[in-house]
Image (cartoon, rainbow, N blue to C red):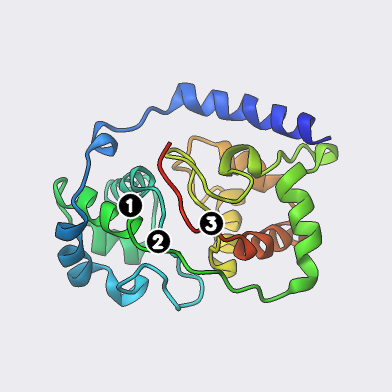
Amino acid sequence: MRLLAIQSLVVLAGCVGILWAPHPLAQTKGDPEIGAGIAARVCVACHADDGTSPMPNTPRLASQHATYLVKQMKDYREGRRTSEVMGNFVAALTDEEIPHVAAYYAAREAIPGVVTDPALLAPGRALYDDGNPGSGIPACSGCHGDEGEGTRRFPRLAGQDVGYTVEQMRRYAAGERTNDRGLMQTVADRMSEAETLAVAQYIASLMVLETEEE
């Protein structure tokens, strides 16, 4: 069953890989020390100094892959991903500043997530590891890694805020978030609310102490 789910995801990911190539800026290496000053001016109110925001429904950025953060910030700034709050803040960042901010948060140490419903961990793990071949849901681990570590292209999920994960899946399913050329829309649209919440709880329980961009 897991093989079938992963094969389904490989096909989807292959399509996305053809349609989307990283923007040249995504290859730019930033300086975390420079990024610290920019983040203190622009980002800390929501994401905290160390990227482990205690605010509900707010993404944790600590240890996220820098290339992924660069892409998301540019997508916000250029309207490919929408958020009134993020759009306003990122609009103030230059092409030179964005990689520095990304490098800063990528270098912060992640902390364990908060599980709000432990009873959902078992079904969440089953979906994360094996998907649901009956409804065409691929395994999350196929792209995001067995421990939620992610890659340069697919975000780290380990320890992510439950409410943020659920909201992003809702936005994908509703067609409100489209900046990944359809991969997550396809997945989220096939998942029930119960499945989405269970996976979000399991993701929050994952903890990877060290990640490196692959």
Q: Which residue is the site of mark 3?
A: 208
Instruction: Identify residue type, mark 3.
Output: Val
Report x, y in % for residue 49.
30, 73
**135 sits to left or right of 191:** right
**Relative to 65, residue 22 above or below:** above
Q: Are marks 3 and 1 in contact (CB under 8 Å)?
A: no
Instruction: Identify residue type, mark 2.
Output: Leu
Residue occupying image coordinates x 29% and y 38%: 26
Q: Nearer the viewer, mark 3 or mark 1?
A: 3
Q: Which residue is the site of mark 2?
A: 61
**142 sits to left or right of 99:** right
Report how far apart the C-alphas of labels 2 and 3 lie in the structure: 13 Å
Earlier sequence position, callout 2 versus callout 3: 2
Earlier sequence position, callout 3 versus callout 1: 1
Q: Nearer the viewer, mark 2 or mark 3?
A: 3
Q: Which residue is the site of mark 1?
A: 76
Please, what secondary structure does the residue beneath circle 3 have?
loop
- Packing grade of label 3 (10 A; few <14, some 14-19, many >=20) is some
Earlier sequence position, callout 2 versus callout 1: 2
Report x, y in % for residue 203.
62, 59
